Amino acid sequence: MSTYRFGSLPHKDLLSVAQLSVDEIGLIFNTAAELKRNREKHDSVLRGKKLAMVFEKDSLRTRFTFDVGMQDLGGHAVFMDHRDARIGQRESVRDVAKNLERWVHAIVARTYKHRVVTELAENCSIPVINGLSDYLHPCQALSDFFTLYEKWNGDIAGRRITYLGDGNNTCHSLINTASKLGAHLTVCTPEGYEPNSKVVHEAMLFARQSGAEIRITNDPEKATIDADAVYTDVWASMGQEDETEERAGIFHDYQVDDEIMGRAKPEAFFMHCLPAHRGHEVTADVMDGPRSIVFDIAENRLHVQKAILVLLLHP
Ligand code: CP
Ligand code: NVA
């Protein structure tokens, strides 16, 4: 039986890292560390609680870790497979939310349109967690930075991280998190694939307080110089499959290979949210090499999401 006193987040939902203060991110990291350290101890923190997992897209990590996370904490997850029909198609998003709140204690949603996640959140009284939308992937970025927090003993401010590839959902949430935590993030994309300007603008405002430097560039030759970590993601995200071939040509110079890693610090980590496509955004040598921490990040999805569940649901 656990005697650990868990805190709580002063939010109903977890939709974006941009909504969190630095202290709240710290609370998530400390809670995740405790849940990781004493995995067996906290097996009844969410006893009797039920989580609906409403997914319009495929998933290995997010689906598995939320499900196992609820089991670890004494709760239960129910998977609602929406991969054939989008949420809101059979009945309105609002009505789905109004039904679910009568049966379960929280919802994790993975959607095409970000608006669907926010609409679910606006129309129910229970917590809604963003499990990836076309705009953001907050659980991923929190797990990425929690992993760096572990590797660098909490010393994140002032570190240099370079993201190479598409200015997508994963990239947006990394920008949000880096700007809050004072990490220097260089985002390097082909022209026309830069991150959303609203995300960048907001990050610049956070950066004034945290000391972060957020840089957007199109030059892969210089982007990884002196980096402490190099990050990439797929070139075509879910929903963009028909652009795969076109993007392979456009993103060719942004592949993370030994040369690009060679410009980073010798001890720099390689990071990827997964799934990875060896030979596309990353070479097999880098992906499977000694600097790769991709499976440590994948493991931490479990601990970080358990922390989010406890901090939103524990009385
Ligand atoms: N990184 C990530 O979210 O993985 P899945 O798409 O498998 O959930
Ligand atoms: N950007 C990717 C992330 C997958 C975890 C996608 O949206 O498909």
Image (cartoon, rainbow, N blue to C red):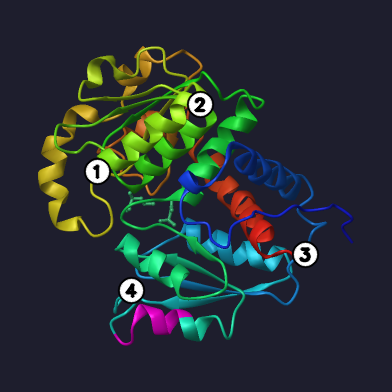
Residue 94 in magenta? yes
Residue 209's disc number: 2
CB within 8 Å, label 4 to label 2: no
Instruction: Give the labeled residue for mark 4.
Output: 83
Q: Position of residue 248 (x, y in %)?
A: 16, 41
Q: Earlier in the sequence, mark 4 or mark 2?
A: 4
Residue at the image point whose x is 34% and y is 41% from the top: 199
Q: Is residue 212 left or right of residue 41?
A: left
Instruction: Give the labeled residue for mark 3.
Output: 45
Q: Is residue 19 left or right of residue 255?
A: right
- Viewer-nearest of discs 3 and 4: 3
Residue density around tag 4, few if under 14, some if 14–19, many if 20 or more, within 10 Å: some
Residue 235's disc number: 1
Q: Secondary structure at mark 3?
A: loop
Please state the extent of the stretch shown in magenta in the rendering: 90-97
> Callout 1, which amino acid?
Trp
Foreground residue among 288 and 157? 157
Q: Position of residue 7 (x, y in %)?
A: 75, 52
Residue density around tag 1, few if under 14, some if 14–19, many if 20 or more, within 10 Å: many
- Viewer-nearest of discs 3 and 1: 3
Q: Give the alpha-carbon distance from disc 3 to disc 4, as whole Å.
A: 31 Å
CB within 8 Å, label 2 to label 3: no
Splitting the image into 4 quarters, where does residue 202 fall? top left
Residue at the image point whose x is 58% and y is 85% from the top: 103
